[in-house]
Image (cartoon, rainbow, N blue to C red):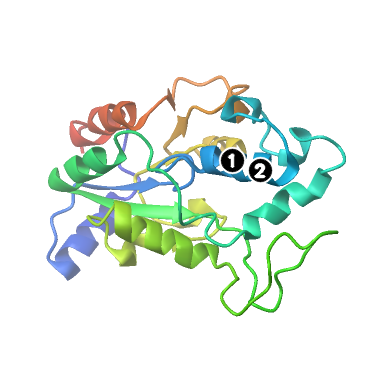
Amino acid sequence: MMFSNQKFLQQQNEIFHTDYVATIAFDLDDVCNQFNQRYAEVLNDTFGLSLTIEDITEWDLTKVVPPYIGPKVYDLFKKPGLFRYIEPAPYVVEVMQRLTDRGFDIIIISDPPSGHAYSDVIFGDEPYFVPDDNNHSNPCDDKRAWVAEHLPMIPKSNLFFGQQKYRVRFDLLIDDKPDTFELFQKFGLPILLMDKPYNRHIQTDNRITNLLEAEEKIYELLLYAPV
């Protein structure tokens, strides 16, 4: 695999007096953390369901809940703290630390949903939360706080928020979203697909099942690849 970012990385190292060997981008939700596990808990508590993460077989969540819920399934993305209090993915801390120690520039790139202001906490047909001055959500700040707590080796300046991830400079992306993977394939950009029930329709040799496998692939593709 050729370095897609090598010229820029060399310039970056010269300007900032760093010595990075490559830039690796990680998606946050369900790659670095276990978002769907937390989301399923909230979903079940709210609507009296019994879904597991293995039941989330579609990226479009309206297709995995009963029809009476429909688009309200996305209202829960505005639950205060939903993106803050999530368990880390297995191995994420040690893998990130090893990659950092080996000279990789690690960035986090995530597409957060919209939050709401303190005066806009009632949505859908029912008020899910009691409105008060502190009851509002900010998914971007929740994600920043999560990374600061669980992945302190990653500078806060290395967090990027946006949907069009192909516009950011890096040598390899690890992501779970089917559309992102397929778009990167069309562009010929390097990406590893984190295995999830909702992306198993994709046939690829670039599938990984955990971050230890991601680490092995990173070394294979970038650390020992000829420049």
Q: Please state which of residues 74 and 19 is positioned toward the viewer in this rendering.
A: 74
Task: Note whether 136 is above or below 113 in the view shown.
Answer: below
Q: Position of residue 200 (x, y in %)?
A: 58, 22
When asked about the image quadrant of residue 98, the answer is top left
What residue is at 85 percent from the left and 59 percent from the top? 125
What residue is at 48 percent from the left and 40 percent from the top? 30
Give the quadrant of the N terminus. top left
Residue 99 numbered tag? none
Left or right position of 107 against 65? left
Real-space CA distance between mark 2 and mark 1, rounded to the nearest whole angstrom: 6 Å
Q: Secondary structure at mark 1?
A: helix
Q: Position of residue 150 (x, y in %)?
A: 31, 52
Give the quadrant of the C terminus. top left
Residue 41 numbered tag? 1
Q: Please state which of residues 44 and 152 is positioned toward the viewer in this rendering.
A: 44
When asked about the image quadrant of residue 93, the answer is top left
Q: Position of residue 160 (x, y in %)?
A: 43, 61
Left or right position of 25 against 179? left
- What amino acid is at disc 1? Glu
Left or right position of 107 against 142? left
Q: Are marks 2 and 1 in contact (CB under 8 Å)?
A: yes
Q: Secondary structure at mark 2?
A: helix
Q: Position of residue 185 (x, y in %)?
A: 53, 35
Tag count in the figure?
2
What residue is at 72 percent from the left and 55 percent from the top? 75
Q: Please state which of residues 162 and 11 is positioned toward the viewer in this rendering.
A: 162
Pointer 2: what residue? 45
What residue is at 36 percent from the left and 50 percent from the top? 170
**Label 1 crowding class (10 Å Cα cut-off): few <14, some 14-19, many 20+?**
some
Task: Note whether 123 is above or below 53 in the view shown.
Answer: below
**Label 2 crowding class (10 Å Cα cut-off): few <14, some 14-19, many 20+?**
few
- What amino acid is at disc 2? Asp
